[in-house]
Amino acid sequence: MVNWWNQDMGIFHHPTLPITKSVYKDFKGRVLRVPVLHKPPWHFVRYTPTDTNNQSAESTIQVLGGRDDRILKLLAKKLNFRFDYFDPPERIEGTSNTETGYFSGVIGQILRKEADLFIGDVGLTYERFKHVEFSFITLADSGAFVTHAPSQLNEALALLRPFQWQVWPAIGVTIIAVGPVLFLLIALPNLWQPRFKVRSYSRLFFDCTWFTVTILLKQTGREPKSNNKTRFFIILLSISATYVISDMYSANLTSLLARPGREKAIHNLYQLEHAMTSRGYKLYVEKHSSSHGFLENGTGIYSRLYNLMILRQGNNDILVDSVEMGVKMVRDSRNVAVMGGRETLFFDIQRFGPVNFHLSEKLNTAYSAIALQLGCPFVEEINKILRAIFEAGIITKMTENEYEKLGKEKSLSSYEIAENVAKDTNKDLKRQSKAEEEHDKLKPISLKMLQGNFYLLCFGNVFSGLVLVGEILFYKRRLKNKSKRKKRSFIISKWKKIITFKIRKYRLVLRRFYMNAMHDAFVSTLEYVE
């Protein structure tokens, strides 16, 4: 476009208005209205009620620091503007109502031009892109959830933990099978070519079985018979029992006793779903956050989790006001999980004691940026500065500085982060650091850790006593049955003799009667001769 001419230069381009890049390089002290939310480590805000008697009254805010506060100050210094923090009425990032189209929270204020920009943990979503404009990213984060740290397993069952449950059946089958195998190696060759006399094959089977059990338990024993095949089998059994099973078991048991095991942690969403259905876990999410949008509008596992939340907790019991409040709930309860940004969760975990929490694996990639009004003319200038400090690692260094401050102050309440820590808090911190040290270091073996051995010994003694009582009762019953059988056999033999005697007596009587009858008949047939 040609819009100017003079005699010296001829036709040339000379814009009537200055270009945008040159205008917004210097704001000349303009004041921008910026809403602020308390969300460590991005912003630390202290709210002071104007009326101490009425907690619901309006509060004055004081920004105590935070990484995004430092970024905003850097932008203000570079672009020569000032900013005025104010407390948004709802204190949420905001979400849209699909029926009315109303957008709540700080995003809605930017949309209605009640605020110039907002910097914080603002997740980039498709819904928000339609209402506000975002700058270059200030954080490359990921979604995650936090649960309570797995509790320590019962030490009474430590004897079973050196091997997984899949190994114990194999060991049991080995103990049961090696006895009969040894018996077959001894008995079958002797049946084919007898070389020694076997008094009782049942006794030989018992000796082989008991020998294999003693080999597996104490690695020594007296072999039932001596031949080459038996010795070779016993050598293999001794090596497997001593160096494979016993040594590995002892080493694993010692390490487990020195560092007691813990319950299986929840690492991903599928394990969380299983915990919610079987163990009664409750999942919470910050209201009107990007994580809330993922659950509410997501598909697959996100949709199933959201339906479980609604079914088990209800619509009014799935949201928390802030991630900080949710992390406190996780600290105080063992069946609660909170979903949010991984960096925010990690920072709160460090604040309230890492030994109390377990952070899941990364769920999804999430980015945060500065929210601006649609068509913002100075977004390119902000992007230049953000891109430069992001690529130079300055933003990462700012985040690390917040963690370094946390390590020095270690405050239990974010509202006291700029104040001196009280004596009671110091005691709690010392107790917490002591617990962390005890959690990390190895523990000496104590009688409490060996209680499983005593339980096993007690069980063995009780079982042996029951077997002894059973044997005594069986022996008495056997003697009683034997005496009854003897008495019964005596009676039977007596009656047998009586019956035999009677039969013989009646047989003789019948025989005599028959002989007399035959004699009389024979005599009657003869003629009388004088």
Image (cartoon, rainbow, N blue to C red):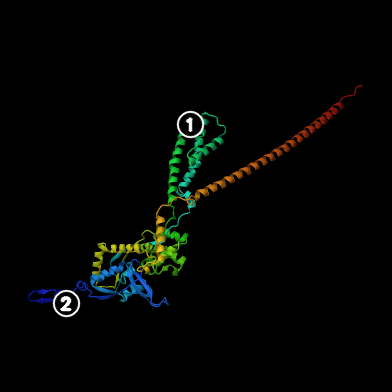
Residue at (44, 39) in percent of width and height:
239
> Which quarter shows the C terminus?
top right
Q: Report which residue position mark 2 lands on.
A: 16
Q: Report which residue position mark 1 lands on.
A: 227
Q: Nearer the viewer, residue 463 or 1?
A: 463
Q: From this viewpoint, is residue 264 visible? A: yes
**Marks 2/1: CA–CA distance:** 112 Å
Q: Image height check: is 46 above or below 396?
A: below
Q: Nearer the viewer, residue 372 or 252?
A: 252
Query: Given the image, on which type of amino acid does mark 1 rest?
Result: Asn
Question: Which quarter of the picture shows residue 138?
Answer: bottom left
Query: Given the image, on which type of amino acid does mark 2 rest?
Result: Thr
Q: Residue furthest top?
A: 530
Is label 2 or label 1 in front?
1
Q: Position of residue 246 (x, y in %)?
A: 45, 43
Secondary-structure class at tag 2: loop
Q: Position of residue 465 (x, y in %)?
A: 58, 45
Using residue 92 as the reference point, say whether residue 72 is left or right of it: left
Q: Residue furthest front?
A: 423
